[in-house]
Amino acid sequence: MEQYIAFVTQNWMLVLAFIVILVMLFLNLFGGKLRGYQSVSPSDAVLMINHDDAVVLDVRENKEYQDGHILNAIHIPQSSLASRLDELEKYKSRPIIVSCRSGQRSAHACAVLKKHGFESIYNLSGGVMSWQNASLPLTRS
């Protein structure tokens, strides 16, 4: 036991870095469950849309949405999401895939949805950029 204590005191920066890496790994693996939503890849999102009747919620701004969006996506900009949640009430029992440009704004939107009682929420990892990188189609309106 004394050897462990001696090692930790002599190599405290190494031990601290190891602990930080373990915490980051834990958050990466189980963070979605702790936050109340999960990330989903574009290919998994397609499967959910086709087989689980998932709804896509696009939280980008109007200009971004008009430049191209996932087919049949519901558009509610993140800035007005809290005030327009009533538009999503009818989809509360269905899986909701939230998308934005890169996946950051949609993560915040997922938290808002979870806070308001939505059960099955998924964040499109990488957002519309990863959707396009997977050679999946966008539509314009």
Image (spheres, rainbow, N blue to C red):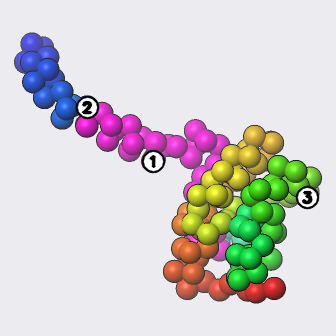
The prevailing secondary structure element of the residues shown in magenta is helix
- Tell me where residue 135 appears, x and y as whole percent: 55, 85
Q: Is residue 97 visible?
A: no
Residue ID at (57%, 66%): 102
Q: Which residues are magenta?
A: 17-46
Q: Which mark is residue 16?
A: 2
Residue 129 counted in the magenta span: no
Q: Which residue is mark 3?
A: 87
- Please, is residue 83 above or below residue 27 in the view? below
Q: From the image, state whether disc 2 or disc 1 is nearer to you.
A: 2
Q: How many marks?
A: 3
Q: Which residue is mark 1?
A: 28
Quarter of the rendering containing residue 81? bottom right
Question: What secondary structure is marked by label 2?
Answer: helix
* Residue kind at label 2, given as amino acid type: Leu
Of the numbered discs 1 and 3, the one sitting upstream in the chain is: 1
Question: What secondary structure is marked by label 1?
Answer: helix
Q: Between residues 50 and 70, which one lies in front from this camera angle?
A: 70
Distance from Cα at disc 1 to Cα at disc 3:
32 Å
Question: What secondary structure is marked by label 3?
Answer: helix
- The quarter of the picture where the C terminus appears is bottom right
